[in-house]
Image: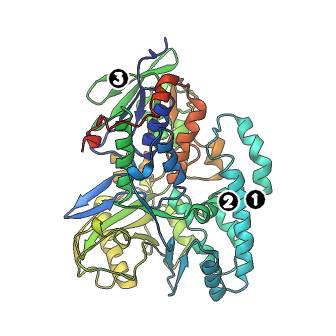
Amino acid sequence: MPAESRDPVVVIGAGLGGLAAAVRLRALGHQVLVLDAADQPGGRARSFDRDGYSFDAGPTVVTAPYLLHELFELVGRDSSDYFDLVAVDPFYRVLFSEGGHFDYVGDEERLLAQIGDMSPPDVDGYRRMVAHSQRIFDVGYTQLADKPFSRVSDMLRIMPDMARLSAYRSVYSLVAKYLKDERLRQVFTFQPLLVGGNPFHTPAIYLLIHWLERKWGVHFAKGGTRSIVHGLVRLLGDLGVEVRLNTPVERLEVRDGNVVAVETADGQRIPAKFVVSNGDPSMVYTRMLAPEHRSRHTDRAVARKRQSMSLFVAYFGTKKTFPDLAHHTIVLGPRYKGLLHDIFENKTLSDDFSLYLHAPTRTDETLAPPGHESFYVLSPVPNQKSGLDWEKEAPRYMDRILTHLDERCLPGLKDNLTTHFSVDPRYFENDLRSHSGAAFGPEPRLTQSAYFRYHNVSEDVGGLYFVGAGTHPGAGMPGVLSSARVLERVVPRGSAEEAKSLLQPTRSLGSSKLAAE
């Protein structure tokens, strides 16, 4: 017997994917209830407050901002009433281990001038690479990012275009075809790491990220990414959607082949019209869905998937400011391919590292006490398949990173620290419920992309759908928000009258704890 139509759609997880899904489901006329295990919304995009400093826990780079704006437009609201985005320039500053730097910017004239200074023959190569990136974008993003890949025919349909665009090659291989200077190859191939991929294995379709950044720019949310999360929760409050925190879902109840309810950790049974999970599909299938309901995603099948790398993220505040620092800085180490091989294949913790340094107070001074700075630095590390003892490794790794930053780009850092702490693969595995402590779900390889990634519609049971980093189209803010777009194509419609009524702006209903704040 199917779930009663008066039951709400239950969204598991209040990450960006779950919140975006809840808005779109409400715009389709459904009653929606969002459940999250944590004490605050956001998932990977949650935040930390320590000693007067504010830190985004996870994503800090906002690209394709229209995906956020349209969520508000769907229900007759203006996103600027909920949060503010500002453009970041440069997009990234890349520091080379041998000295010097490159500012990756959106302005082509400035970009080409820097390329010409470094490697004159690569100016024409870059132009041709950008043209190729745009062609990939026109197919891989514009046509496919919000389309479900539930059937083999969906994959077969795009294979000729993908072959013609050499999308089967790795990102590094395709970029190397156009650029000869190794430093430039690194500048224009690190982006897959931001979605959990090794540039030497990630298919070249992900080169579309380059044109996506060039097309819409790189932005930062005033107040941090948390302001986007809070804005979405407030919007849901305005729409009468409850975001219920501290409510971990432990089990999906299946009747006659369909999910009809969820069971929480405290034993509460919540009936559901259908369920949308923003959780890691690997964990949902193996932890929430009983084996007898799984014919495709068995424990063995899930175990065969290659999970992405994990992250060590250090958060720290200083009583000294560093005004010459860029908002986003990539600190490259002496090795590139070898380091990535250690992380993804050998699963060892190397003596060297490459880092992403985020300095939000470059753009928003309110995130630290007056005259102070707040930072986070991200280091790709092996996932929990490594067997590393992070209880012992974390303090040592933290000290190594702070020492390295002190020597490379933040002189006097260690003498001016006021607070610091870190998260590591244990956080992703335990707090974020991510399989193997992976930071981005399954690794984006050719055999784990599009049709070969977890589908947005479950093949094992009816009434179960997925959004977020683990499903199509993949990780990263544009991918996660696009997965909620895919949802509109596959779920049943709700009440047309309900949907129409939302277009009349209303005062905040304060139906979630956060909205009331």
Q: CA distance from mark 3 to mark 2?
A: 43 Å
Is the residue marked by circle 2 packed among few (<14), some (14-19), or many (20+) residues within 10 Å? many
Residue at image mark 2: 204
Relative to 76, residue 203 above or below = below
**Residue 442 appears in the picture as rendered:** no
Among the two numbered marks 3 and 2 on one chain, the one whose residue lies closer to the N terminus: 2
Q: Could you tell me the amino acid type at mark 1? A: Ser
Q: Are marks 3 and 2 in contact (CB under 8 Å)?
A: no
Q: Could you tell me the amino acid type at mark 3? A: Ile
Q: Which mark is residue 251?
A: none
- Position of 70 compared to 135: left or right? left
The foreground one among 409 and 494 is 494
Q: CA distance from mark 3 to mark 1?
A: 48 Å
Tag 2 secondary structure: helix
State the image coordinates of residue 86 (x, y, percent, origin top left): 44, 64
Among the two numbered marks 3 and 1 on one chain, the one whose residue lies closer to the N terminus: 1
Quadrant of image for the C terminus: top left
Q: Could you tell me the amino acid type at mark 2? A: Ala
Q: CA distance from mark 1 to mark 2?
A: 7 Å
Residue at image mark 3: 270
Residue at image mark 1: 166
State the image coordinates of residue 478 (x, y, percent, origin top left): 54, 52
State the image coordinates of residue 473 (x, y, percent, origin top left): 59, 46
Q: Are marks 1 and 2 in contact (CB under 8 Å)?
A: yes
Q: Are marks 3 and 1 in contact (CB under 8 Å)?
A: no
- Could you tell me which residue is drawn at 52 percent across and 27 percent down? 294
Q: Residue furthest front?
A: 504
Among the two numbered marks 1 and 2 on one chain, the one whose residue lies closer to the N terminus: 1
**Residue 320 appears in the picture as rendered:** yes
